[in-house]
Amino acid sequence: MISDEISNDFLRSNSMFGGLTNSELNIVRTFLVQKSFQKGQYILVQGETNSTLYFIISGDVVIKKYHIDPKKDEREIVQLHKGDSFGEMELIDIQNCAASVLCLTDVDTITLSNSSLYQLSTINLKIYTLIIMNLARDISRRLRSTDDLLAMLS
């Protein structure tokens, strides 16, 4: 469970929790876990397993990706900050991490695991459906941005 210092309004500011009422967010809160990471620490490593979505409540991270060799061709994809989330793809498709996430500062997060999301689906299908639809929208927005970038490179 997460601290009472993190308000439902703050949660609702992230698109993942959009459309949820206070009573629904109070149910979701019981499945969320706070985790902290230190500057320079990797939260996720490309190719390793992950079954958790991370929502940044403070700090900055960089998403890095490599094609073949992480020591030679790792590239910065994007920096994420307070209010951003990552790990959505692994939460939904249950694949290994598509990229690495490195802390640029000390970082505090709220996490939602795949098993917690499943438990949520068994007790309140409406909340589960809203979260999944919100995640799908976020992933779709990111895919559109990637498509635009690829089109510019052609």
Image (tube, rainbow, N blue to C red):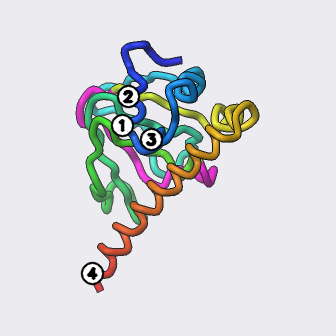
Give the structural element (helix, strand or loop) at label 1. loop
For image coordinates 39% across by 21% down, the residue present is 7
Separation of disc 3 and disc 1 at Cα?
24 Å
Total number of numbered labels?
4
Tell me the mark number nearer the camera, choosing from 2 and 4.
2
Task: Work out whether residue 53 or residue 140 is closer to the camera in this orientation and state it.
Answer: 140
Tell me the mark number nearer the camera, choosing from 3 and 2.
2
Q: Please say if the residues under marks 1 and 2 sit with CB atoms less than 8 Å apart.
A: yes
Q: Within the image, what quadrant is residue 8 found in?
A: top left
For image coordinates 63% across by 46% down, the residue present is 129
Task: Work out whether residue 133 or residue 75 is closer to the camera in this orientation and state it.
Answer: 133
* In the image, residue 128 lies in the stretch drawn in magenta: no
Horizontal and vertical percent position of residue 18: 46, 42
Separation of disc 2 and disc 4 at Cα?
39 Å
Among numbered discs 1 and 4, the one appearing first in the sequence: 1
Q: Within the image, what quadrant is residue 105 found in?
A: top left
Tell me the mark number nearer the camera, choosing from 3 and 4.
4
For image coordinates 44% across by 23% down, the residue present is 35
Q: Please say if the residues under marks 1 and 4 sit with CB atoms less than 8 Å apart.
A: no
Residue with the mark numbered 4? 153
Give the structural element (helix, strand or loop) at label 3. strand
Horizontal and vertical percent position of residue 132: 58, 48
Q: Amino acid at mark 2?
A: Asp
Instruction: Say if 18 sits above or below 26 in the image.
Output: below
Residue with the mark numbered 2? 9
Separation of disc 3 and disc 2 at Cα?
27 Å
Residue with the mark numbered 3? 44
Q: Left or right of 104: which side holds 50?
A: right
Q: Which residues, given as a range, are shown in magenta? A: 92-107
Among numbered discs 3 and 2, the one appearing first in the sequence: 2
Horizontal and vertical percent position of residue 46: 46, 50
